[in-house]
Amino acid sequence: MIAAGIEALNVYGGCAYVDVRELCTYRGLDMPRFEKLLMREKTVALPYEDPVSFAVNAARPLVQALEEAERERIEMVITCTESGIDFGKSLSTYVHKLLGLKPNCRLFEIKQACYSGSAGLQMAINFILSGTSPGAKALVIATDISRFALADAEAVREWAYSEPSSGAGAVAVLVSDRPRLWRVDPGAYGNHAFEVMDTCRPGPDNEAGDADLSLMAYLDCCEQAYRDYARRVEGADLRHSFDYLCFHTPFGGMVKGAHRQLLRKVCKASSQEIDADFERRLVPSLLFGQRLGNTAGASVLLALAGTLEAGDFSAPRRLGLFSYGSGCCSEFFSGVADAGGQQLLRRQGIPAALDRRQRLSMEEYETLLKGGEVIRFGTRDARLNHQLIPSVWPAFEAGRHLVLDRVEAYHREYRWAGEPG
């Protein structure tokens, strides 16, 4: 049988962040409740960043690392996002051009709330497993941005605890028949889906939802998707089949609650066992999510990256992944990684890149919240001010990151920081 999975993975966490504890103190939020978020930092997208720039900055190191012959085997580019910039034109067309990929390539976009990244990954894996183009590769990029703006809210209190947890980021994965980083278990998956109005985006630039309903849907899907997995996979055992677990992570506290309920219902586990299991099998997956915030479609892939970065892979380990997208669709699936995969992931230097981000003061953050410089959905013409927060721009130049430069007749034009505009 053809092997399939992730050949390479990279995370892009932007160039600016805020300290979440400082933000919660600034907003006067209840600190005991804040502690339950299990958050440290959140990436803040600048006005000249969008899902395209995040996607390209995540994928570019993976593409550049390939030999020319390998690069030409990328035959599919899938962008996965709920932060779309056009009702018809796919982000993948911009990404394909900016990465300099060959023209005979299948380009499309998937939108299914936070499940989109897993949907794209499964689509790519099944393309490889089909064997219709032996040796081909697929580039899957989950990219999402949350923006808050004072002008969009009746009051800051409306944001409550979603403001500190909503972040931005992109995860790019190269999928092939050389799964050096993570190899999927073919046919090992479980799904659960139903219609629910837990969260939605009724307009391009606004979100609505019911946090309690979303939590209940997430918990239900976590249990039922796993049970469908266990029905399909002979001998599956939640306690013993998986060395690590990686869940969709709106914030760490939600993952902790879902894990607790899952072990209680499926394993009848005690509180002491549940706490120890969370520390052993799930805490590594929170490593990057605690620093970027909720990255929506990229979230479960970010959890995978955190586990590979921080876990013990002295022997091959099976990872169970749970993905949830509001509305809703969910999936539990699995795969195997080893020390070689961990070494490949660590070469990307993701923690160091996050350390190089510029910490925003609350005054700088509030400047961004005014929203006057943000390019709204459907903007016809605009030029971006890259010096809106002068302290951040050097971080973009140092990494030669892609930024949005202008919009002309709805067409977005980009440039590399440090190059003339």
Image (cartoon, grey):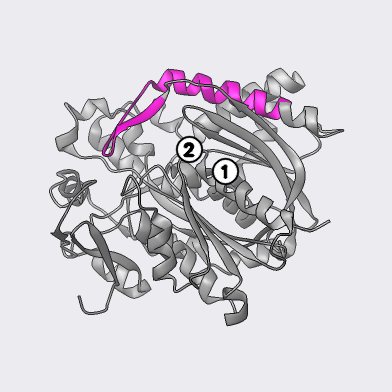
Q: Amino acid at mark 1?
A: Ala
Location of residue 23 with respect to 305 vertically, above or below: above
Q: Is residue 280 visible?
A: no
Q: Magenta residues?
A: 199-227
User: Percent x, y for residue 74?
Assistant: 58, 68
Dot placed on the residue nearer the N-terminal end, 1 or 2: 2
Quarter of the image where one finds residue 50: bottom left
Q: Quadrant of the C terminus?
A: bottom left
Instruction: Tally the numbered discs.
Output: 2
Identify which residue is drawn at 57% across, 23% down.
219
Q: Quadrant of the N terminus?
A: bottom right
Identify which residue is drawn at 52% across, 71% down.
63
Could you tell me which secondary element the residue under label 2 belongs to?
loop
- Label 2 packing within 10 angstroms: few (<14), some (14-19), many (20+): many
Could you tell me which secondary element the residue under label 1 belongs to?
helix
Q: Is residue 18 visible?
A: yes
User: Percent x, y for residue 10?
Assistant: 53, 61
Are the residues at dot 1 and dot 2 in contact (C-beta closer than 8 Å)? yes
Residue bearing the label numbered 1: 119
Front-most of residues 306 and 199: 199
Confirm whether the magenta stretch covers residue 404. Answer: no
Mark linked to residue 112: 2
Front-most of residues 267 and 206: 206
Location of residue 173 with respect to 73 vertically, above or below: above
Front-most of residues 324 and 96: 96
Location of residue 66 with respect to 215 vertically, above or below: below
Q: Amino acid at mark 2?
A: Gln
Quarter of the image where one finds residue 129: bottom right
User: Percent x, y for residue 361?
Assistant: 23, 51
What's the distance in space between the residues labelled 1 and 2, CA to CA? 8 Å
